[in-house]
Image (tube, helix red, strand yellow):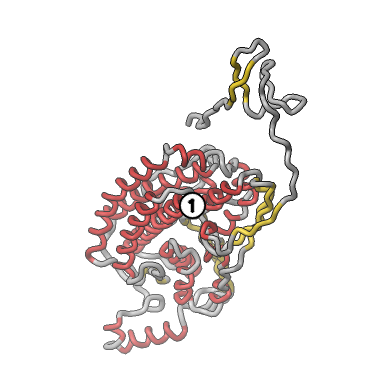
Amino acid sequence: MSKRTVELELATPGLDAQGRPARVPLGATGPAGVAAAAGATNVGPSEPELVGEHMLINLGPQHPATHGVLRLVVELDGETVVRVIPHVGYLHSGFEKLGEYRHYNQIIPLTDRTDYLSPMANNIGFALAAEKLMGIEITPRCTVLRVIACEMSRIISHMVWLGTTSIDLGAFTPFLWAFQQRELIYNLQEMWTGARLTTSVTRVGGMMADVPDDFVTGLREFTQSFPRTLAEIDRVLTRNSVWLGRTQGVGALTAAEAINHSLSGPMLRASGVPYDLRKDKPYLDYETYDFDVVVGEHGDVYDRYLVRLEECSQSNRILEQALNRLPDGPVNVDDPRVILPPKSRAMNDMEAMIYHFKQVMDGVKAPVGEAYVGIENPKGELGNYLVSDGTAKPVRWRIRPPSFINLSALPKMAEGHLLSDLIAINASVDIVMGEVDR
């Protein structure tokens, strides 16, 4: 990729010693504080140097540009950011502690409410960890449906990020385009799960339901129309001079700095590190899909935008492949100790009724042990760590939240930039406070 900066020499008219016009570079001052260039004269004195105290301001937790109840205590020298201290915890809900008092399937609704912009992916991450703990092998149809759910979640999350970041930087039309595409996927989510936001789509050992008949047709139509919207957004933003000025060279992190801060997802890949769990630690048969890991060069806000925009195209490719290979068959494992029997059987067959009663009252018991599963969520590596003591409730549930860890790099990225740049840098992290605070 070629260098993207354009160097301009700013100057003002002046006169040299012979009285001829001369260009006087702005900002160059001589010993007496007078602009000087090759003996130029007739130039007024420079601005006096102003000395002032640093100022502390609160950005948030009610400010719309903090994308949730995030409070940033900012130390300013004029308009230059000297230091940023993020204050979190305003949305703390105690999800991990609540999970210790619930059966494994009862925890799934809690995962909806962490990263509520990609709920289906959160459901799948937890289900994979519980299934690893219990040694459950899901069906081929369930595997493909979970890939579809993960990539739909990725597109939803990136469209929300693109729209809100555009609003933060003054571009309104891409916000409308992005949210329109999000609503189309929400329609499909509602068709599948009955909910648009809190889906609870998974169960340990399967899914809450199979997709309806019109789902595959609707998703196929979306994959055909979605690239046109991406092309429009690319046309309006990617080479827009205002967008370039607000994003290029702003909040840059080198590959070493990104790794040192334990970043993941687009934040890490924008700095040039080609790490994607779908390729490096495959799950759900992702190694059998043909897609590219999108990597940036400069690690700034602009590269994070490019990475997320192209990831939407790659997710669209994966969705097309998943639809083409979606097999017939059951979505749930054939084990009445794990999956509830159908209501019709439970009401007419004594054995099914007993299984239903035992599972609802006692839950699905996991063997003693521990398990960790990380998946490539839209914001980075989402990890679920479970510890079992042999009962139907985990003795410990711990989430590795990508938003929380990525947010830790904000003070480093913002230092030395202007206050207006802080808005762009914070937006580029793509945090969701339900996941940060948990």
Q: Quadrant of the C terminus?
A: bottom right
Question: 81 and 91: which one is in front?
Answer: 81
Looking at the picture, does residue 319 appear above or below residue 361?
A: above
Quadrant assignment, res 118: bottom left
Count how many numbered circles sit on residues in the image.
1
Residue 237 percent coordinates (x, y): 41, 42
Identify the residue at the far top of this view.
18
Q: Is residue 301 visible?
A: yes
Looking at the picture, does residue 77 appear above or below residue 134?
A: above
Which residue is rendered at x = 37% and y = 87% of the image?
Answer: 354
Residue 331 percent coordinates (x, y): 32, 67
Which residue is rendered at x = 58% and y = 63% of the image?
Answer: 61
Q: Which residue is mark 1?
A: 168
Q: Is residue 387 visible?
A: no
Is 169 displayed left or right of 12 in the figure?
left
Looking at the picture, does residue 279 appear above or below residue 364?
A: above
Question: 111 and 87: which one is in front?
Answer: 87
Is 229 displayed left or right of 394 in the figure?
left
Q: Secondary structure at mark 1?
A: helix
Question: 361 and 85: which one is in front?
Answer: 85
Quadrant assignment, res 137: bottom left
Q: Amino acid at mark 1?
A: Asp
